Amino acid sequence: MIRINEDYLKKLEKCGSGSFGVVYKVNDKTAYKIYEETTRVCNMHVLVNPIMKYNKVKLNRLINLDKKIIKTDLVQDVIFVNNKFKGVKIKYYDGKLLNRLMEEDYSIKKEVANQLYNNAMELNENYIYPTDYKLNNIMYVDDSVKIIDLDDRYTKVYKLYNKRLEKEVCYGLGDSIKTFFNEYDYYNVINRDLPDLITRKKYDHMYDFESIKKYLEDKDESYNYIFIDKDSNFELVKKLAQDKNNRIVYLYKYSMSEKEDKNNILWNYKKNNIDIFDTTEFSKSHLYFCDFNVRDASDLTKEKVLSKKI
C-alpha cells in the first residue's frame, strides 16, 4: 500500500487521462493512476466514478498475479491519497495506442495482432477477463503489445474459468482486431444502402479464441484482386469469378446516375451467382474495401488498382 498526499501529486507530470482518471509519471518505470471522484457519460451526465469503490479482493488478486503473468503488466500496488483510496500503481509505458497504428504496413499489423491474441490468451488462462478490448486500451511499446487499464470496472477477475465471460471477451477482442485490420465495423455496415449490403462480407462476431486464431491464420491467404466497373465484360468477369483465388472488386464514381447503374449491375451479378467481394469509390484519393489489410492488398495504391482494372 502506497500513501501519498495531494501536494506530492501536484509535483508529478501528467502523462495521460481517460474517463475514470489521470495517469501521472513517477519515473521511467512507474506511473500512478489516480481516479477522479466523478465521471461523465456521453459528456453529459455526471456520475460517481464506479471504480472509486475499493475492490480489495480484485485488486489484491491482480497484484499477486502480476508476478506470474509474463506478457502483460497488471497492478503493482494500491494508492491512498490523504488516507483515502484513490488509485493504483502501474508500469509506465512510452508508446503508441493501437488506434494510432491503423495505417501501418500489413506485416507490422499482423505481428501486433498475433501478439495481442497471445497476451489475451495468457490473461484468459489465468481467469482475467478484460471485456473492454478497444484499441485505445492497448499499447505498442518497443515492439511489444501491452494491454492496459486492467484495473477498470470492465475487467473481471475470477478464481475459476467462466465460459460466459470468455465469450464476452472474445466478442470485444475479435471486433477490435477486425477494426485494426481496417475492416468495416458493424455500425458502418448496417447503415449502408441495401444493394451495397449484398456485396459486403458478413461482419461475423467471434465468440471464442479458436475462431480468432483461425481468422488470423486466414489473413495469410493469398488472393488475386481484380477490379471491374460498369463497362467491364460480363462473361469475362463471370469466368474470373469461378476461380476462388480471385477477389472481384467493383469500382465506381460517386454520382446519382452511377449509383443507380451500380446497383443494377450488382443485382445482375448477384442473380447470376457471381460474388462481388466489395465495392469502392475510386474518385477518392484512397481506396478502401473490406479486408484491405491482407498480404496482397497492403500496397495497392489508386494507380495500381486502376492499372489492374479489366
Image (cartoon, grey):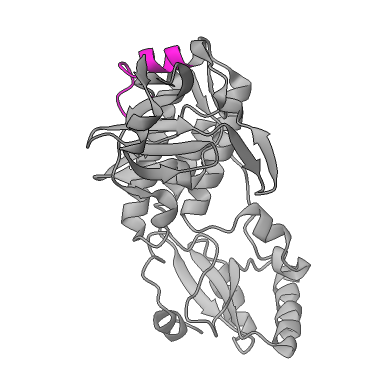
Q: Residue furthest front?
A: 7
Task: Give the tally of numbered discs.
Answer: 0
x 70%, y 81%: residue: 262
For this rendering, which residue is in front, 67 or 76? 76
User: In this image, 72 relative to 182: left or right?
Assistant: left
Question: Residue 12: x percent and y percent?
Answer: 31, 38
x 55%, y 71%: residue: 248
For this rendering, which residue is in front, 113 or 202? 113
User: In this image, 56 relative to 280: left or right?
Assistant: left
For this rendering, which residue is in front, 170 or 297? 170
User: In this image, 291 relative to 76: left or right?
Assistant: right
Question: Residue 234: x percent and y percent?
Answer: 64, 82
Which quarter of the figure has residue 278? bottom right
Question: Residue 56: x percent and y percent?
Answer: 50, 12
x 64%, y 42%: residue: 40
Relative to 204, residue 163 above or below: above
Q: Is residue 275 magenta?
A: no
x 32%, y 55%: residue: 107
Give the residues drawn in magenta, as a range: 59-74
